[in-house]
Amino acid sequence: MGNAQPIRFADYWLMRRIGLGATAEVFVARQRGRDAGQEPVALKRLLPPLAQDPEIVKLFLREIKAMQRIDHANVAPLLDHGTCADLPFLVLPWYDGASLRQLLRHNSALQGSAPALTPEQAVWIAKEIAQGLGAAHAQGVVHRDVTPTNVQITGQGHVIVLDFGIARVAGLAQTTQGQALRGKWAYLSPEQLAGGAIDGRSDLFALGSVLWEMITGTPPFQGSDPHDTMARVEATKLPEIAKDTPISLRPIWTSLTQLLAQKPQDRPAHAEAVVLGWQQWLDQCGVQESEIVSEIARIARAAAPMPTPQDLHEAAELRGEAVTSPELDPDATQVRASASHSGSNAEGSGNALA
């Protein structure tokens, strides 16, 4: 890493790159002219080869418009945006800690075959995510990509929803042609998979999959390959719950059954109702919320990734059709395909913000 010099871009110094995805790259940056002790930010910019693609540019600008609508503690706020050298960019706070995916991986390695989190920790994190999604839905924004990779857990135990890069925003024309599919296989709702109409209940379905994974260690519809996973999502048949599950957990399994219902109308209508139910369950558990937050913060600090030589300022470039690297994005089953699932090609991100 050593002696890499910052790169000047717009009103910022790009310090080191922390993510490279199919359409964008993300840097830790500092604003020019500010004190050296200022808090760093995360600057996300479109990859140069894609700046001439009107659809990709519209999608990037859609993310900016989505974030401009949302003001909530569980959603990353938009600090700045603009264009430099024909590359649109946006600026968010830089968060320490780890993504939920990194946290789960880290703790799973320590716990062995046991779930990475306690049920109380898992439900508390899911509740925080639901609060952020509820704020987005209230502004007409559907995230469409709720996965552990797109949730950041800071070293203080704050839960932040990231990456509205494929969000559907009410009042804005859609950029994809036909019945394009965007999302990640194991977390897609059945209506997303079918190319149908979606709303906030699709995000709640994905959140149910994330919570199921946090409690059991595996997404409920994860198959042996993408086609197997698709079939499981389409069937929406939940795995059997172990008979020795504690009675205290039954309300959570009931909630998950509702969230993961095949038809949107059978799911909770709004995130607020989910938040209320989970908060009531947490209150009945007898565990202090401060204890939960403290332990989650500790795990996030321990799971925080260390900078590697790949974080140097190497030229951004597309790496061919299969852009996603599983070692960078463990949720890397993101695709764009027709509703008939034909002619699909990989599309993923190497960072929760990319």
Image (cartoon, grey):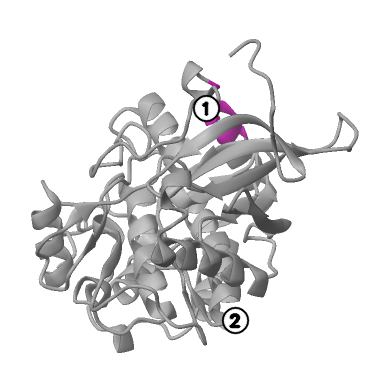
- The CA distance from mark 2 to mark 1 is 33 Å
Judge the density around disc 1: few (<14), some (14-19), many (≥20) Cα neighbours within 10 Å.
Answer: some
Q: Residue at x 52, y 87 (%)?
A: 171
Q: Would you identify the image quadrant in which residue 307 lies?
A: top right
Q: Nearer the viewer, residue 75 or 219?
A: 75
* Label 1 element class: loop
Residue type highlighted by circle 2: Gln
The label on residue 305 is 1
> Left or right: 33 with respect to 165?
right
Above-or-below relation of 86 to 230: above
The label on residue 313 is none
Task: Report how many numbered discs are placed on residues in the image.
Answer: 2
Above-or-below relation of 114 to 196: above
The label on residue 139 is 2
* Label 2 element class: loop
* Magenta stretch, residue numbers: 298-307
Above-or-below relation of 155 to 227: above
Give the percent coordinates (x, y) of residue 21: 41, 43
Most common SS among magenta residues? helix
Judge the density around disc 2: few (<14), some (14-19), many (≥20) Cα neighbours within 10 Å.
Answer: some
Q: Is residue 302 magenta?
A: yes
> Left or right: 219 with respect to 90?
left
Q: Residue at x 32, y 46 (%)?
A: 331
Q: Is residue 91 magenta?
A: no
Q: Nearer the viewer, residue 317 or 294?
A: 317
Indicate the quadrant containing the N terminus: top left, top right, bottom left or bottom right: top right
Residue type highlighted by circle 1: Pro
Circle nearer the N terminus (2, 1)? 2
